[in-house]
Amino acid sequence: MNEFELIAKLTRTLPTNPSVLTGAGDDCAVLDFGLPEKLFLFKTDAVVEGVHFPPGTPPEKIGHKALGRCLSDVAAMAGTPDVALVTMGLPEHFDAEFVGKIYDGLNALAREHGVAVGGGETTTNPERLFISVALLGTVGRGKQILRSGAKVGDAIFVTGELGGSLAGKHLEFEPRLAEARWLAEHYAIHAMIDLSDGLAGDLPHLLRAAGVGAELLGRAIPISRAARLRAKETTSAKPPLAAALTDGEDFELLFTVAGGHAVRLLDAWKKQFHRLKLSCIGKIVAGRGVTLRDQRGARPLRADGYVHFA
Amino acid sequence: MNEFELIAKLTRTLPTNPSVLTGAGDDCAVLDFGLPEKLFLFKTDAVVEGVHFPPGTPPEKIGHKALGRCLSDVAAMAGTPDVALVTMGLPEHFDAEFVGKIYDGLNALAREHGVAVGGGETTTNPERLFISVALLGTVGRGKQILRSGAKVGDAIFVTGELGGSLAGKHLEFEPRLAEARWLAEHYAIHAMIDLSDGLAGDLPHLLRAAGVGAELLGRAIPISRAARLRAKETTSAKPPLAAALTDGEDFELLFTVAGGHAVRLLDAWKKQFHRLKLSCIGKIVAGRGVTLRDQRGARPLRADGYVHFA
């Protein structure tokens, strides 16, 4: 049983109550506490030494990534992050200065997005550093973008460039909060998710949630410089397109919008966010699964993106 | 630098914003999102294998404790818990049935208190199980009980019996949610905290927050049967009173109320909660620190209660 199978089994029996509009299975839980104009977004995410960052990673970058992952999930709902709590499992004989620098990185990203750090907890995790961040945010009532709204005929978009994130981006990425809010404000975004497990791993989540399929155009998929460089340097490395599809940890936005709005959206995006690429990479189709079209023809794409449990 | 010194250093520089009424340093963060009648309580707490429960602990009890600790913190603010998220770091080769049973224990306690489990995350923590729970609750605006309100002349109360929790109670305790809400509704509770580090460790948090001291009556401190039994069985065990003061993990409420209300409160409590003991154990005095009066006279009590970092 892998991570996804376990989660699917567990989430069938979770207790609920009237506060929960959307529970397990989307980027954040969506909660209703009776505020007329707002809903709440609630998310936790963890980074573990040796799993999400290697030993020796600069501590500021560990803190940046720990909070950034949660911020990216709030972005995927088109929300605004507000308050974070930090739970830190520290190895024995921890270095207080090192922990302080983790907070420096986390606090800097928090300040950039107006997020308060309302406290948290330190405890012991003897063998390795374990940081779990809990984040509370808000979104205009009815303005949350779920994973489940994709419609046949939608254009599929992705921000930025994909692949090769482990060369550095996974520790420095900028969560696409402003971009997501702009999208939700100006366009009827049907479905959105942030890319953490790779396009080939995350697009199926979005498709399954809506009972639809997708066709991707291989040549339209934006491949990062890091993925291209790695493919050149190492003969054993993945081809660049495979890296863009499966490397994971991109923390870019994947979303769909009615096909008829695609050109107008691309034009407006270029004016608004001229430093960040936006690519239309394919379309939503009837059926199931993902078909990839490239120079070798059309073939089914397997969903073996990056999975946290191997 | 121990846990408390590290936390004190870190919390001086945390980013804040107008949502945060009370940040790090109380049982929960208190947040204001503009709901006219309600404030929000936000808390995270973790349990780690070999630190908070021994290997071999029944998985249902691990789940109970993981959520129960957060519920106890919401109780300490006189709040109502609403939605929890669960982050689980699983060892390699985890047993899915075992994980399911952890959720069974957690879910049962959640249902008992009307708490939804809105999802969470599973990740890898290779050497040991690590569970972090994030909890969101509410409290009537202005009804939250902080640690900081103790006044000279207050009577000091504690629910239940203290000490010996590691014999079993720490895995089965009932968070005192109904009791705390009843207290806040019927009495002007000045300050409250839940006992996780032991009376000798937690009372000083409450005293420092208000700049006051305390006198405890040794014979009034309620000692658990487990602490008495252990002292009889093992000559090397702590004397029962020392166990009640320092064992930790009691998850009982410690609170203060004006001395003139003490007798009326005790009488009303007996009618309302006849199965749970309430003890008046001393009073708030001017000055600093804790004085313990017992048959050997009055002596300062050192704050070396249970500390998560040794």
Image (cartoon, coloured by chain):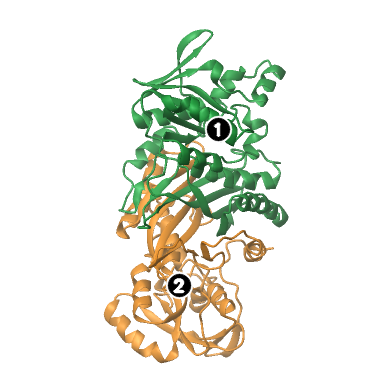
Chain colours: A green, B orange
Q: Secondary structure at mark 1?
A: helix
Residue pictured at 63% horizontal, 63% vertical: B11
Amino acid at the residue labelled 2: Ala
Parent chain of label 2: B
Identify the residue at horizontal 57%, vertical 84% (top origin).
Answer: B213
Write down the residue under mark 1.
A269
Give how far across and how far down residue B297 sits, in percent.
Answer: 56, 91
| Quadrant where the N terminus of chain A is found in the figure | top left
Q: Relative to B105, is A248 on the left or the right?
A: right
Q: Residue at x 50, y 70 (%)?
A: B234
In the image, is residue A141 above or below residue B167?
above
Q: Which of these two is toward me, A303 or A236?
A: A303
Q: Foreground mark, 1 or 2?
A: 1
Q: Position of residue B10 (x, y in %)?
A: 65, 61
Q: Secondary structure at mark 2?
A: helix
Label 1, label 2: how far apart the Cα atoms are: 67 Å
Mark 2 highlights which residue?
Answer: B227
Give me the chain letter of mark 1: A
